[in-house]
Image: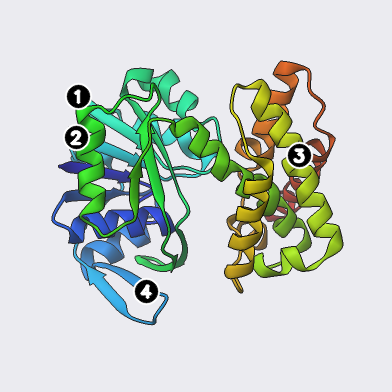
């Protein structure tokens, strides 16, 4: 397959794009960071593994999507607030049958993409894998975990199977789901409960379940989300999701949530597609979400303060 990866010089885009290239796919990493693109084209993409091993993967990279031409698959890993810009810039890579697979955090990115290129092009997914950007052209694979992809209508389409086959050849734990929206909401539980809590408290993942206050807060966020999900027609097993959340956090010793990394680096967060998605859905159904509201308010106040100082 000809594959383009938006946000390809970032942590997750680099890991997925690099592994696809190593597996023999024709991959081009697309990124706005010129230093990262130059480093990748000059030295290859460097991927550090948890066990200390380092792989250097030859892969093409560019800041200019128009130079790539039509591709079979576009994978989107950009932050939610860059979605519209990235998809608009990717239009020269769209052929008649080009699909766009979003593996972004949160809920709502598929609608943003569909509004630009049409819903028929969009596939969605989620990953429990994690990574960190170490430097230009260098990423660290900090967590190997399951990735799930699917069609919004639940079909097992030929293009979905082709994308799945390519991803499986990388060695990634890849599953195809006919209930992908439910799978995304199950992952969204982890983000809603842990990301803003870690960002505001500056806790590592394993510190979150150690304190009564943070545990009570996360449990309350989950309870609100379960009510909203039911109104959306999505059944979440609250007890199962709580056990999964605590297990993930306890195993991720020293792990730093993506939103915590954002606030520490004084970057814009993705709160709008995480807790903000729960608030928005709650409003559609007339359901109060006071804890999720509070997380949105606090994270936004926090980021407004440091972004204003950075300007």
- Establish if 251 lies above or below 85: below
Element type at mark 2: strand
Label 1, label 4: how far apart the Cα atoms are: 35 Å
Q: Which mark is residue 223?
A: 3
Mark 1 is surrounded, within 10 Å at the Cα level, by few (under 14), some (14 to 19) or many (20 or more) other residues, namely few
Residue matched to label 1? 97
Q: Residue at x 24, y 57 (%)?
A: 170
Q: Which of the two discs, 1 and 3, labels the residue nearer the N terminus?
A: 1
Element type at mark 3: helix
Q: How many marks?
A: 4
Residue 106 in sight here? no
Residue matched to label 4? 48
Q: Which of the two discs, 1 and 4, labels the residue nearer the N terminus?
A: 4
In front of the other: label 1 or label 3? Answer: 3
Residue 238 in sight here? yes
Whole-percent x, y for residue 15 in the image: 35, 59
Label 1, label 2: how far apart the Cα atoms are: 7 Å
Image position of 80 (left or right of 168): right
Residue matched to label 2? 72
Mark 2 is surrounded, within 10 Å at the Cα level, by few (under 14), some (14 to 19) or many (20 or more) other residues, namely many
Q: Are marks 1 and 3 in contact (CB under 8 Å)?
A: no
Whole-percent x, y for residue 9 in the image: 36, 56
Whole-percent x, y for residue 182 in the image: 52, 33
> For this rendering, which residue is in front, 139 or 282?
282
Label 3, label 4: how far apart the Cα atoms are: 37 Å
Mark 4 is surrounded, within 10 Å at the Cα level, by few (under 14), some (14 to 19) or many (20 or more) other residues, namely many
Q: Are marks 1 and 4 in contact (CB under 8 Å)?
A: no
Q: Residue at x 74, y 21 (%)?
A: 283
In front of the other: label 3 or label 4? Answer: 3
């Amino acid at each position: 397959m000809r594959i383009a990866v938006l946000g390809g010089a970032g942590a997750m885009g680099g890991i997925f794009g690099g592994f696809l290239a190593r597996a023999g796919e024709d991959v081009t990493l697309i990124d706005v960071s010129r230093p990262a693109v130059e480093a990748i084209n000059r030295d290859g993409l460097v991927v550090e593994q948890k066990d200390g091993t380092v792989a250097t993967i030859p892969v093409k990279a560019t800041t200019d999507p128009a130079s790539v031409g039509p591709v079979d698959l576009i994978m989107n890993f950009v932050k939610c607030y860059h979605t519209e810009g990235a998809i608009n810039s990717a239009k020269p890579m769209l052929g008649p049958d080009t699909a766009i697979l979003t593996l972004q955090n949160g809920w709502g990115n598929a609608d943003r993409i569909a509004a630009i290129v049409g819903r028929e092009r969009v596939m969605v997914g989620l990953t429990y894998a994690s990574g960190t950007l170490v430097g230009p052209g260098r990423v660290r694979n900090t967590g190997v975990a399951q990735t799930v992809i699917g069609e919004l209508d639940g079909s097992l389409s030929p293009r979905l199977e082709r994308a799945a086959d390519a991803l499986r050849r990388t060695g990634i734990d890849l599953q195809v789901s006919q209930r992908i929206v439910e799978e995304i909401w199950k992952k969204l539980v982890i983000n809603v409960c842990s990301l803003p809590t870690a960002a505001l408290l500056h806790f590592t993942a394993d510190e979150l379940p150690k304190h009564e206050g943070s545990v009570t807060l996360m449990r309350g966020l989950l309870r609100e989300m379960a009510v909203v999900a039911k109104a959306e027609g999505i059944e979440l097993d609250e007890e199962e999701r709580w056990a999964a959340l605590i297990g993930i956090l306890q195993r991720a010793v020293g792990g730093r949530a993506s939103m915590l990394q954002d606030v520490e680096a004084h970057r814009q967060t993705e709160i709008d597609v995480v807790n903000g998605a729960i608030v928005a859905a709650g409003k559609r159904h007339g359901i109060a979400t006071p804890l999720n509201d509070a997380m949105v308010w606090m994270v936004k106040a926090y980021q407004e303060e440091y972004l204003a100082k950075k300007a």
